Image (cartoon, grey):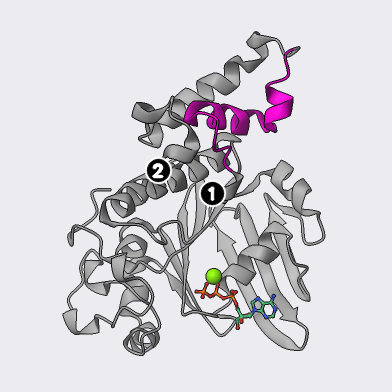
């Protein structure tokens, strides 16, 4: 395997005396869609916090593009190309969708970017990026609408687009479909799959229909450790994962995996009742 774009080596995180992450070794390949799944409390979000520099690991190492970033400040990691999806609250609600994307492409706050002394030509590359993202996000029709007026699903796509607009090496998405209805879930799934063609996407997801359909690699976590990792079909058929799944470890519909053959593996949906994706067949990718 070629050198991973993002990697961890025996990563550990403690909250006081509680060990939230232990011996987590990951290799994220460039231009792949890599999902992290596992039950509530498995340490998935903690892993993202460690990757982004929000919390300091108690053990192990993290590297981005071959460079050690274990002790690099969070804003510096962003500059090096590690993007985390913005929260809805960090959209600029009164600005248009297009303006939000343009600002993200410039890596600017609104007061910097809207400064009257800025020359219009300096904005051209950012505008071009914003136009391209509008298409990819399927938001071209609402380009002039204020971001705050968009539906929840559209806002979540815009968040992803804003993270992408800065052309990061890796984008981290924590449960990008949470709280979404079926149509928006389908749109987000299509967006992530599309982004995976020329970006590296690492995402946490409870919806197994999405995980099995669009991931190149799936890492299953449990109790702060990596339980299993591999291509979707292999993970789906792993006895440990099956057992964990039957134990209601994962929500969503396993039968939506491309070649699923065990409808009895469907677990009660404890967390995401909206997690049923519309179609139950093979991915078009
Ligand atoms: N700030 C904190 N202080 C102490 N313990 C924490 C803190 N944040 C998380 N934990 C604990 O660490 C463990 C891992 O939490 P984490 O949020 O990473 O899980 P998760 O896999 O993202 O779960 P979910 O699927 O519910 O989002 C849990 O037991 C949680 O209670
Ligand atoms: Mg979490």
Q: Residue at x 34, y 27 (%)?
A: 141
Q: Residue at x 39, y 66 (%)?
A: 231
Is the residue 178 above or below the residue 252 in the image? above
**Magenta highlight range:** 91-116
Question: Where is residue 113, by image quadrant?
Answer: top right
Residue count near mark 2 (Cα–Cα under 10 Å), binned few <14, some 14–19, many ≥20: many
Question: Where is residue 18, by image quadrant?
Answer: bottom right
Give the secondary structure at mark 2.
Answer: helix
Q: Report if the CB atoms under discs 1 and 2 are less than 8 Å apart.
A: no
Residue 247 percent coordinates (x, y): 36, 90
Give the secondary structure at mark 1.
Answer: helix
Residue count near mark 1 (Cα–Cα under 10 Å), binned few <14, some 14–19, many ≥20: some
Q: CA distance from mark 1 to mark 2?
A: 10 Å
Residue 221 percent coordinates (x, y): 51, 77
Mark 1 residue CB less than 8 A from any atom of ligand 2 = no
Q: Earlier in the sequence, mark 1 or mark 2?
A: 1
Q: Identify the residue under disc 2.
A: 154
Q: Residue at x 60, y 55 (%)?
A: 4
Q: Which mark is residue 31?
A: none
Q: Identify the residue under disc 1.
A: 88
Q: Is residue 115 left or right of residue 265?
A: right
Q: Can I make out residue 85 in this image?
A: no
């Amino acid at each position: 395997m070629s050198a991973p774009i993002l990697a961890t080596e025996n990563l550990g995180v403690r909250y006081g005396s509680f060990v939230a992450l232990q011996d987590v070794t990951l290799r994220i390949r460039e231009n792949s869609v890599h999902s992290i799944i596992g039950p509530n409390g498995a340490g998935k979000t903690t892993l993202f916090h460690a990757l982004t520099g929000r919390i300091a690991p108690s053990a192990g190492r993290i590297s981005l593009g071959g460079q050690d970033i274990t002790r690099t400040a969070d804003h510096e990691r962003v500059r090096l190309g590690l993007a985390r999806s913005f929260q809805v609250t960090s959209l600029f609600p009164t600005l248009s969708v297009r303006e939000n994307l343009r600002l993200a492409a410039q890596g600017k706050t609104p007061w910097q970017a809207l400064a009257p002394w800025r020359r219009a030509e300096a904005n051209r590359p950012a505008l071009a990026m914003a136009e391209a993202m509008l298409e990819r996000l399927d938001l071209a029709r609402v380009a002039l609408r204020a971001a705050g007026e968009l539906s929840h699903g559209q806002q979540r796509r815009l968040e992803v687009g804003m993270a992408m607009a800065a052309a990061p090496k890796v984008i981290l998405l924590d449960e990008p479909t949470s709280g979404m209805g079926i149509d928006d879930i389908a749109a987000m799934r299509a967006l992530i799959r599309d982004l995976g063609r020329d970006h590296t996407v690492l995402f946490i997801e409870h919806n197994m229909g999405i995980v099995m359909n669009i991931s190149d690699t799936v890492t299953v976590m449990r109790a702060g450790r990596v339980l299993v990792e591999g291509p979707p079909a292999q993970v789906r058929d792993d006895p440990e994962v099956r057992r964990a799944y039957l134990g209601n470890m994962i929500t969503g519909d396993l039968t939506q995996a491309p070649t699923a053959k065990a409808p009895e593996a469907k677990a009660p949906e404890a967390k995401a009742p909206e997690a049923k994706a519309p179609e139950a067949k093979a991915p078009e990718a």
